[in-house]
Amino acid sequence: MVSTLIHLALTFGMLSLLAVGGGTAVLHEMQEVLQTQFQIGPERFLEIYSVGQLAPGPNMTMVTIFGIKIAGALGAVVVGLAFFMPSSVLCFWIGRFWHYIGETPWRRAVQNALEPISIGLMCSGVYAVGKSALNGPLTIAIAMTAFLGIFYTRINPVYVILGLGFLGAAIMYWQPGLV
């Protein structure tokens, strides 16, 4: 049990430090690590990710559910601390240093270099989740409708998510063979 907790702490601590641009940036790596090292497959990953999206608060609190699945309540505490503490401490010290150095040309150069990296990491996370979630014409149609509804209208995304969520649930309940 102790070795599992240490393994969880090291794994999620490493993911925390790689989360440049936010937790979404490490979703792909997290999915790979959880599958290879803790036998949590893509479907289970997607289920837990979805719960994290529905729960109030930061969506990356879902990592504690992985801790529960792997090592119980103590696993949740270890994973929560390992995932949020290193990046929080790093952000605190980098933020202080960033403020201290002010506007310098090399600071702008570093920021310019990190911006596309962050975007690429987030796209990788979206791809990892989408690869598991989009498994047929119905799920692709729901995803495209959500994207178009949010991108081209002024409708609050909450209404789009709730409306399409209920529609998808109803279709999948009455026609489970469509998915």
Image: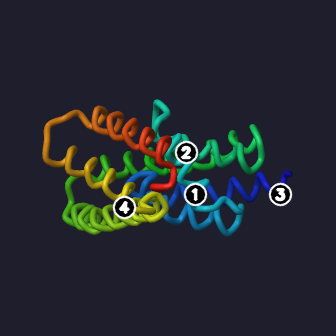
Q: Residues within 10 Å of mark 3 (few under 14, many from 20)?
A: few
- Mark 1–mark 2 distance (CA, rounded to whole Å): 24 Å
Q: Report which residue position mark 4 lands on.
A: 137
Mark nearer the N terminus (3 vs 2): 3
Q: Nearer the viewer, mark 4 or mark 1?
A: 4
Q: Residues within 10 Å of mark 2 (few under 14, many from 20)?
A: some
- Mark 4–mark 1 distance (CA, rounded to whole Å): 18 Å
Residue 113: x %, y % from top left: 28, 69
Asked if disc 3 and disc 1 are in contact, CB closer than 8 Å, the reply is: no
Residue 3 badge: 3
Q: Is residue 91 left or right of residue 146?
A: right
Residue 94: x %, y % from top left: 41, 52
Under mark 2, the amino acid is Phe
Q: Report which residue position mark 1 lands on.
A: 43
Q: Is residue 82 left or right of residue 75?
A: left
In the depicted view, which residue is nearer to us: 84 or 165?
165
Q: Secondary structure at mark 3?
A: helix
Under mark 3, the amino acid is Ser
Q: Is residue 99 above or below residue 162?
A: below
Q: Nearer the viewer, mark 3 or mark 1?
A: 1
Residue 84 badge: 2
Q: Is residue 12 left or right of residue 21?
A: right
Q: Secondary structure at mark 2?
A: helix
Under mark 4, the amino acid is Pro
Residue 130: x %, y % from top left: 41, 60
Q: Residues within 10 Å of mark 4 (few under 14, many from 20)?
A: few
Mark nearer the N terminus (3 vs 4): 3
Task: Look at 35% across and 63% down and name the residue there.
Answer: 123
Q: Is residue 175 above or below residue 35?
A: above
